[in-house]
Amino acid sequence: MNEPLDISGPLFSIAKKQQLVRFVLGETSAEESHWLEWKSTLDLDEASGVFHIARAVLGFSNRAPDPAARACDGFAYLVVGVSPGELQGIARLDPADLPNKLEPFLGTHEAPQWSPTWVEIDERLVLIVEVAPPRPGHPIHTLRKQGAGVQAGHVFVRREGKTEQASPEDMRALTQRASGERAPGLELIVDCSTSGPLQWVSRAAVDDVTRRAVAIQAQVLLDQAKWHEERAMRNQDDDLTATVKALNLLAAMGSTPRKDPRTFQQFIDEVEKWRAEAQLAATLNIGRQLMELNPLVIRVTNSTEEPVKDVRVKLTIDADISAETEVGEIETLPRRPRAFGSPEPLLPPDLGLYGPRQFLPSELQSLYHPTDFTLANEPLAVEWDVGDLHAGETAEMEPIYLTAADQDDQLDITARWVATSGSLGGIPKGSVRLPVAHAPVDLSHLILWSDVGPEDH
């Protein structure tokens, strides 16, 4: 899988530019954006190839400052010689040749700021044209020389994945940029909260409680098996009259049970496997109940006096915390191994008697409507496509459920957020503090298993 590209800042170094090339090459489903364009190859000895670069530089330079700043601090990149799944490379030019070829199209006075870099990838040369960020007060950058049938004075703008002729709306925005004014900015209030102080557990305590709970039941099975094994070795039989009568009756019915085929060591192996499964189930059940105590709800409010479109919020928590979108079911204790020496059952155990129960209260399931968000852990990150918001409107995300461990001496944790909009510039950021409980959850109040099912028999 292709590694994600960090676009939180400019890609100044050769290493980061090489990573950019490999990102484009490896992203077979990648799409170009407002900050990135690629061409599998261009002939820079031909006017059409040079014009393509000039057109891209002009489009990138005529972007609005605030939306451009959302990636690479506003820098933009044209990558020539590579496309998704294809590395063709490009012939190197003399360092002065490309600026000389582009100058007639871009001009010299108040021209866009750009720089070329040649990087080598798998013995192929790739050209990366880096374009400086647009700023308030920058002029409208126009085509200075006719090329490819386009008249001088033409204005190109960069949109998501394509460079086009500027519309009347684009020209108004560029005129406003040239005056040094900023467009109305995005103003959002983002808040998040749990139902109370964040509840957490001690990992060491969870391991100790679950291990001891399972060990008690495992020891009962092992003690019984040892007794049976010692009794068999001494060949001391009790009065088996009742057992013989019962077996004779079953034989008459054609249902004689089979003698236990397991060896003593095989039984011990079964118990050890069961012990691991039972401890894991108990640990997961503790986590599920902890999640029920920590529903996290994120809210976003449009505090402007006009509607905003395509609002997106990202919230991160850099702490020992993970989250799930639902609590899930409390599991039963895994079925214990059949007692050693007991005959195999005539009928399979009724698994339906010990089914799991739903632990999430039904009232919590009806309060929220599904929303479009993605969730990742390590660290915890939630990306929420809020959609459109009317002036003053507040949207509330469907809750996620947190588990936290080893929060000793933590009074609170910080949730950081950043928001963007498709209609207004600006990237508001902020943080919310979530209080943390002063002590871990008392595990004696939690359920290790929803039911203790019977052993096989």
Image (spheres, rainbow, N blue to C red):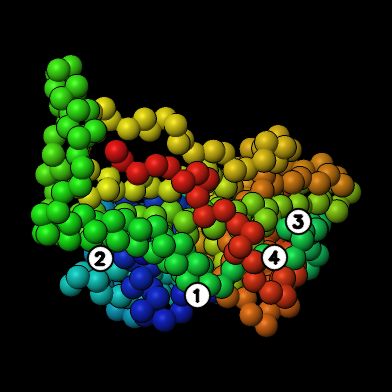
Q: Residues within 10 Å of mark 3 (few under 14, many from 20)?
A: few
Pinpoint residue 78: horizontal percent, then vertical percent.
42, 63
Q: Residue at x 39, y 51 (%)?
A: 30
Locate residue 223: give its quadrant. bottom left
Residue located beneath label 3 in the image? 195
Residue located beneath label 2 in the image? 90
Residue located beneath label 4 in the image? 198
Q: Residue at x 44, y 67 (%)?
A: 212
Q: Amino acid at mark 4?
A: Leu
Q: Residue at x 59, y 68 (%)?
A: 201
What separation in Å lies between label 3 and label 1 (alpha carbons)?
Answer: 26 Å
Q: Amino acid at mark 1?
A: Ala
What separation in Å lies between label 2 and label 3 (alpha carbons)?
Answer: 59 Å
Which labelled disc corresponds to residue 204? 1
The answer to whether the residue labelled 4 contacts the one labelled 3, judged by CB atoms less than 8 Å apart, is no
Q: Indicate the secondary structure of the residue bearing disc 1.
A: helix
